[in-house]
Image: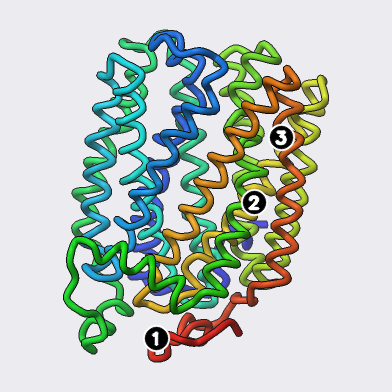
Amino acid sequence: MRQLFRPPVKLPREQMSMAVLVSAAFFVAGYDLNILGLAMPRIMPDLNMAESEQGMTIAIVRLGILLAFPLAALADRFGRKTVLAITIVGSAVFTLATAFVQTPEQFLFCQAMVRVFGYAQDMIAIVMISEEVDDRARGWALGLLAAMGAAGAGAAAMVYASVDSLFGGWRALYVIGAIPLLLIAWLWRRLPETQRFTRLKESGAIKPAGVLSGVKGIMELFTLYPARSIALSALVFIFALGASAAVIFTATFLQTDRGFAPGEVTLLVLAGGLFALAGNFVAGRMSDRYGRRTVVAAGGLMLAGGFAVFYLVDNTTIMIIGWIIGLFGFFAAEVVLSAYGAELFPTAHRSGGSGLRTTMQIIGGAVGLLAKDWLYILLGSHGLAIVLLLPAVVVSIVIVYAFLPETAGRRLEEISPDHHPHAGPH
């Protein structure tokens, strides 16, 4: 069992150090991005927001991805390390600012900006890992990132359990989230630029860049690699449409529909989540061995079935089992989707490709959240509204097998060569 948590091949010290340092950022991001879902029952009445606006609120702040995409794409022009430093500082500033908001508009703005910088940070971090870690262990390393993000979500649940005793209540949660970001920003100065980007820059293939180069890079994804860009966009959008509401509203559903106290929600997240957390390592390693498509299919089916049980069955034991299975499947599928975003495109457009994956995930999730609110108004049930969206996950599995290549274990230059940007799908 311990072998599942180790890289499939021995990695050099430099690669392991980068993986550990970058994964620390994912831990903090997991905390910051999950506080919103946990604390919504406290935040909304304090800011005079209606319960029916929950989905709309989360959807709006998640649309900060629209600015995160071109910001991340700048890493294909200015370098991964430089843009990464900007994103971590921006995340810290707006996370801290959230603790002091006084109106719904201020809250929405600060949280949207947290996601602008936070999502861009994640996009670039995935690219750095994909470019530097041994091709045979790429899935494992991305699984490590996802596992640390999930651990950060668990840490958020632990802190939230004592929200009523914290000075400032829910506002203190954001102060706690901002402090480690500043430490990570200081540590990240040690990260070197990736060798692949350095070689490409030295070859003269990267042209002088302006502030709008991120937008240009996005346009080039669809003009130079239309088939892969469209297929990846459709896959991630449809997957997120079906899965996002199920994952995001777990804590809210337990508190509002099942009467769980904050401490009980924390206990569930820690007890079941620790097992589901293993899904990241298992999925990453298994996808290196058995293929990306196999793992995303298995994960998607587990997600749909597990969360259907969680939201429909009014039995605590069965609910928890369903939740563990569903979350395990979600983590497994997410590892593969993050890998695809970085693997399908060459070095000059890899940050843009990772950004495209995350952007379509957030937009699809936002549409899913809005659809969930509409179905809730129509049906009067949060659980049933969420379950009716889950079949979209199955549709996404079909897209993987029909339109995307298998990338496990292949060199990035083999999947999409740097010297031939017009290469089509393999």
Which residue does the numbered mark 2 point to in the structure image? 239
Which residue does the numbered mark 3 point to in the structure image? 323
Quarter assignment of residue 169: top left
Give left or right: position of 23 versus 1: left
Estimate the x, y position of residue 205 in percent, counting from the top left: 26, 85
Report the residue at 58% width, 34% height from top: 369
Estimate the x, y position of residue 225 in percent, counting from the top left: 49, 77
Which residue does the numbered mark 1 point to in the structure image? 418
Say whether marks 1 and 2 touch (CB < 8 Å).
no
Nearer the observer, 54 or 338 = 54
- Disc 1 marks which amino acid? Asp
Say whether marks 3 and 2 touch (CB < 8 Å).
no
Quarter assignment of residue 104: top left
- Helix or strand or loop: what does disc 2 sit on? helix
Estimate the x, y position of residue 150 in percent, counting from the top left: 52, 42
Above/below status of 327 relative to 267: below
- Disc 3 marks which amino acid? Trp
Figure coloring:
rainbow
Nearer the observer, 100 or 21 = 100
Alpha-carbon distance for marks 3 and 2? 18 Å
Report the residue at 68% width, 23% height from top: 376
Name the N-terminal-most of marks 3 and 2: 2
Alpha-carbon distance for marks 3 and 1? 42 Å
Q: Label 3: how many residues lie within 10 Å, few (<14), some (14-19) or many (20+)? A: many
- Helix or strand or loop: what does disc 1 sit on? loop
Q: Label 1: how many residues lie within 10 Å, few (<14), some (14-19) or many (20+)? A: some
Above/below status of 301 relative to 322: below
